[in-house]
Amino acid sequence: MRQDVPSTPLSIRLRDVVQQALDERRLVGAVVLVARDGELVHRQAAGFADRESARPMDVETVFRLASVSKPIVSTAALALVAQGRLDLDTGIERWLPEFRPRLPDGRPARITARQLLSHTAGLGYRFFEADADGPYAQAGVSDGMDASGISLEENLRRLAGVPLLYEPGTAWGYSLATDVLGALIEHVQHMPLNEAVHQLVTGPLAMADTGFVARGPQRVATAYVNDAPQPHRLAEGETVSAFEGTVGIAYSPARIFDAQAFPSGGAGMAGTAGDFLRLLEALRQGGGTLLPGELVAEMERDQTGGLDLPDAPGFGFGLGFSVLRDPRLAMSPESEGTWRWGGAYGHAWFVDRVQGLSVVAFTNTLYEGMSGRFVTDLRDAVYGVPEVR
């Protein structure tokens, strides 16, 4: 069943953007939710959750989250900080003595939870490597979205055997840091990551459809890849590059149904748009019972020391998501300090605390729903920016 709030200028603009992306076959389906000052002002499901069977998208559709997992797992880690059981600036070898990656010159490196949360730990991703013979590939490191068949412990062992890309704290690089953070949470909480995240975050927020295994395949959106003349269904084991000059992500759409797959903190969860909006709203409103306000303030503080994110002028990175440092440089109508990130299966979200806005756009089409024109058009529609073509 399709569910929408009454028509308003905002909703009309957003529906137009979604419909145009569907008509131009850039997207197969989408769920878009917008909350302003705690009130849901736009709720829309459009297109197909599964095109081949003509199963319509629904606001309760479950999506593979990919990197939308990161702010969920980051919040779980910060909940442990709030309890005084994890320290942001203590070396993680206190809890993970086996995880001791070294610098290229062989020197040992000290990594902190803050550096893991802010992606300044010196780690990388296999999918960023230029070809299939890169160091992570040779070590058999999993990015958390393939059918690897290994444990989280084994993946960290392999990761620790590859030299760091830079000395922790001296640069920024998007990475498997959140997977390491997941192992850290397991050790501090003394339970598997899926149970820990449920206990610390998804349980308290009643995010009932969000977890590391999707139990109802009939509710899960089929994944598609942008193609001509229309997106094609993502195949099991298919590799798709999101960035020119990189080998790309090896996908296993079936992984989310495999209870034996290791819990990837950075990419391994599934959930609904409504569940994720609950998390964003809890954080936007100051953390509620999850986190004290001072830790939310730390999440939204740029942790990069002024470094720009690659191909993202004006953006820094906080603890779990990017932070808009300079709207003019970013050419964005968003307020300074806006939080934003996405997910490789086709998702985008942002929180503008100045405007009281939380926006979630989950699609089943990569990479249009993460970094395509749709993301910019949706943002501009939220702010009422005139379309320029």
Image (spheres, rainbow, N blue to C red):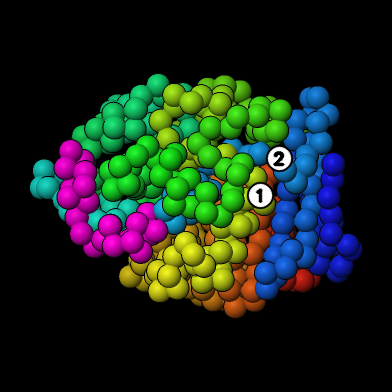
The three-letter code of the residue at mark 2 reads: Thr
Describe the element under mark 1 as helix, strand or loop. Answer: helix
Neighbourhood count class around disc 1 (C-alpha, 10 Å): few under 14, some 14–19, many 20 upward:
many
- Amino acid carrying label 1: it is Ala
**Residue holding disc 1:** 273
Q: Position of residue 2 (x, y in %)?
A: 84, 45
Proximity of marks 2 and 1: CB atoms separated by less than 8 Å: yes
> Label 2 vs label 1: CA separation?
8 Å
Relative to 155, is 19 above or below?
below
Q: Which residues make up the magenta segment? A: 77-99
Q: Name the residue rendered at 36%, 24% in the picture.
A: 150
Which quadrant is home to the C terminus? bottom right
Residue 354, image quadrant: bottom right
Closest to the observer: 281 or 189?
189
Answer left or right for 243 relative to 150.
Answer: right
* Residue 3 percent coordinates (x, y): 83, 50
Q: Quadrant of residue 357?
A: bottom right
2 or 1: tag closer to the N-terminus? 2
- The image shows residue 26 at horizontal and vertical percentages of 74, 42
- Residue 64, image x, y percentages: 59, 38
Q: Nearer the viewer, residue 310 or 251?
A: 251
How many residues crowd mark 2 within 10 Å: few (<14), some (14–19), many (20+)? many
Above or below: residue 163 compared with residue 234 = below
Residue to which mark 2 is pinned: 61
What main secondary structure does the magenta stretch of the protein show? loop
Taking the spot 16% from the left edge, 42% from the top edge, the residue there is 97
Specify the label residue 252 is tagged with: none
